[in-house]
Image (tube, rainbow, N blue to C red):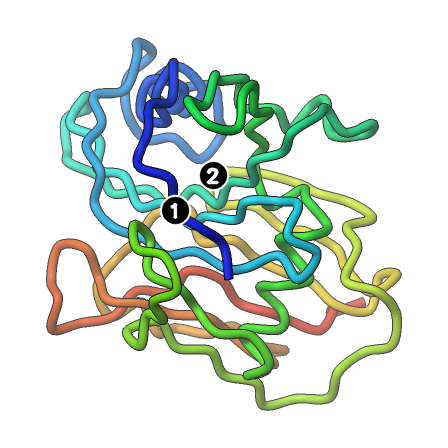
Amino acid sequence: MAEIHRTTLTPSKLELLAVWLPKQPWYQGGGGPAELEKAGGFRLDDPAGEVGIEFMAVTDRAGAEVVTYHVPLTYRGAPVDGLEAALVGTSEHGVLGKRWVYDGAHDAVLCAQLLALARGTAEAQAQSLSDTPDPSVHGRWDGPLPEGEARPSGVVSGPEGTSTTLCEGRLLLRTHRVLRAADAEFPPGLVGYVSGLAPADLSARSLYASFHLPTS
């Protein structure tokens, strides 16, 4: 399991996201930097031990309404060819050195482990503790598993979130960017999902990601 280092990250994750978030089509605030605070999240382990995988929930108070966003992130020790458009920024880690931080909806390692979580073959880990499962995060899988690797072949973001095409076009991952309590309306074609406690209401749940079969 991944080790959580108690050290510095410069600039911090929130500082990187405060600049990056307002540039995204699903951002609901104003045009200036976001005003962020950490609202929760969880981690997944990379079986190869090379990539940090985190699902962050951050609350933004910059707009007319308070909004909590879901931002899946990967942390890598070197830049990745083909992920230039997904780069959130770089940061200096006090133990690991320079880290390249990517929007995880584009990253094959994150997508594969998120699919494994939905299918019950991976376990969510606590966001800030080493070797500690997070039982509040649930995965569910109700459909067949399409053939092919869970490697992104196309990523499209819009006002409703981000859609990532996987398994050579046979599966669609939808990253739900705005976390809402009791978000349980699943469109036709849903075969699996990952949910966690709603940041603003720990008695309810939010949908973090859902998996769908393509409609055409």
Identified at 34% across, 67% down, the residue is 132
- Image mark for residue 4: 1
Q: Residue 194: x percent and y percent?
A: 45, 70
Residue depicted at x 56% and y 40%: 74
The total of numbered circles placed on residues is: 2
Vertical arrangement, residue 191 with respect to residue 39, above or below: below
Q: Which of pointers 2 and 1 indicates the residue nearer the eye?
A: 1
Query: Residue at coordinates 84% horizontally, 65% vertically from top-left?
Result: 149
What residue does disc 2 label?
159
The residue carrying pointer 1 sits among few (fewer than 14), some (14 to 19) or many (20 or more) residues within 10 Å by Cα, namely few
Residue that protrudes farthest toward the front in the picture: 95
The amino acid pointed to by label 2 is Pro
Instruction: Answer few, some or many: residues within 10 Å of disc 2's Cα (few below 14, many 20 plus, some between 14 and 19).
Output: few
Residue 150's spot in the image, x, y percent?
77, 62
Q: At 38% across and 30% down in the image, what residue appears?
A: 27
Q: Image check: 146 left or right of 75?
A: right
Relative depth, front residue between 68 and 184: 68
Quarter where residue 83 is shown: top right
Which quadrant of the rendered structure holds the C terminus?
bottom right
Q: Is residue 168 above or below residue 163?
A: below
